[in-house]
Image (cartoon, grey):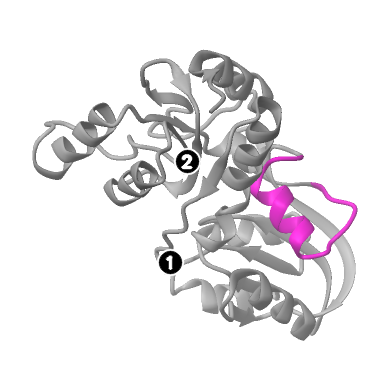
């Protein structure tokens, strides 16, 4: 089985995703989060780094796990109980973890938004939704019946999305931000969209969507963010001739 140096993969990912130039949330810690012995023979990809997905990666004999949501979103000390089990599994099974949050949302080819946009059969993407000094989403002009868009989303995510039908029945200005951008409907509307697609949002956004006059589709935080880790892992597989596997562990959220 072919092997590649972990440091070569990490350097390539860091440069490709431009992690040093993108401002992210403090807990993201983009880049290599856990080392292994320095070599990679098999890649696994998952949306979230958790004890479950780590064990799934071990089961498929991966030595590198690519994730969107990494290990350090919340305080990790002390290393006791399940936290101790997690780090123990990583060390005992020689499993490295590479995480990319906003850099993998933003990337024009490998990113979550780019993949979701393409899956929706939309064209001519433009930057959308400024966050932390950068645009993290995509928007486009279209003329798409809201029912058709609903059906496309259903086919992509495997379940009917939640629809807040506050806008027009024909969607003409569609904006996409994968993940949990539902609490920022006002920002989306201010950037001119009449239809906003994201992963999840709070209860009060139903009334807000009506007030703003926009359609909102919630496709699920997890379901809208599977695209990036798949695209990045496929890219690495092709570049380094390494096998890879997506570990599907949906949260239902």
Taking the spot 16% from the left edge, 39% from the top edge, the residue there is 85
Asked whether, in this view, residue 159 is left or right of residue 58, the answer is right
- The kind of secondary structure element at disc 2 is strand
Evaluate if marks 1 and 2 touch, with contact meaning CB atoms under 8 Å apart: no
Taking the spot 66% from the left edge, 69% from the top edge, the residue there is 156
Can residue 198 be seen at all in this image of the molecule?
yes
Taking the spot 57% from the left edge, 69% from the top edge, the residue there is 219
> Residue 177: x and y, percent?
64, 54
Q: Above or below — where is 222 with respect to 64?
A: below
Mark nearest the camera among 1 and 2 is: 2
Asked whether, in this view, residue 90 is left or right of residue 231, the answer is left
- The kind of secondary structure element at disc 1 is loop
The residue identified by callout 1 is 253
Q: Which residues are magenta?
A: 109-126
Crowding around mark 2 (Cα neighbors within 10 Å: few <14, some 14 to 19, many 20+) is many
Q: Above or below — where is 135 with respect to 40?
A: below
Q: Above or below — where is 88 with respect to 217?
A: above
Q: Nearer the viewer, residue 245 or 216?
A: 245
> Residue 131: x and y, percent?
60, 41
């Amino acid at each position: 089985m072919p092997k590649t140096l972990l440091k070569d993969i990490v350097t390539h990912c860091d440069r490709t995703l431009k992690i040093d130039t993108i401002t992210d949330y403090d807990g993201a810690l983009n880049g290599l989060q856990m080392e292994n012995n320095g070599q990679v023979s098999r890649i696994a990809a998952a949306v979230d780094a958790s004890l479950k997905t780590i064990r799934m990666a071990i089961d498929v004999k991966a030595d590198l796990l690519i994730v969107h949501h990494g290990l350090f979103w919340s305080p990790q000390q002390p290393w006791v109980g399940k936290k101790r089990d997690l780090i123990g599994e990583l060390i005992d099974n020689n499993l490295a973890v590479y995480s990319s949050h906003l850099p993998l949302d933003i990337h024009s080819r490998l990113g979550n938004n780019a993949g979701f946009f393409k899956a929706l059969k939309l064209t001519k993407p433009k930057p959308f939704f400024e966050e932390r000094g950068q645009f993290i989403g995509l928007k486009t002009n279209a003329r798409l019946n809201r029912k058709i868009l609903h059906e496309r989303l259903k086919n992509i995510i495997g379940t009917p999305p939640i629809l807040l039908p506050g806008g027009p029945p024909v969607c003409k200005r569609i904006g996409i931000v994968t993940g949990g951008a539902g609490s920022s409907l006002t920002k989306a509307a201010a950037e001119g969209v009449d239809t906003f697609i994201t992963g999840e949002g709070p209860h009060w956004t139903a009334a807000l969507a009506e007030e703003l006059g926009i359609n909102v589709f919630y496709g699920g935080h997890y379901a809208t963010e599977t695209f990036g880790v798949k695209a990045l892992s496929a890219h690495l597989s092709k570049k380094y001739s390494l096998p890879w596997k997506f570990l599907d562990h949906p949260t239902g959220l």
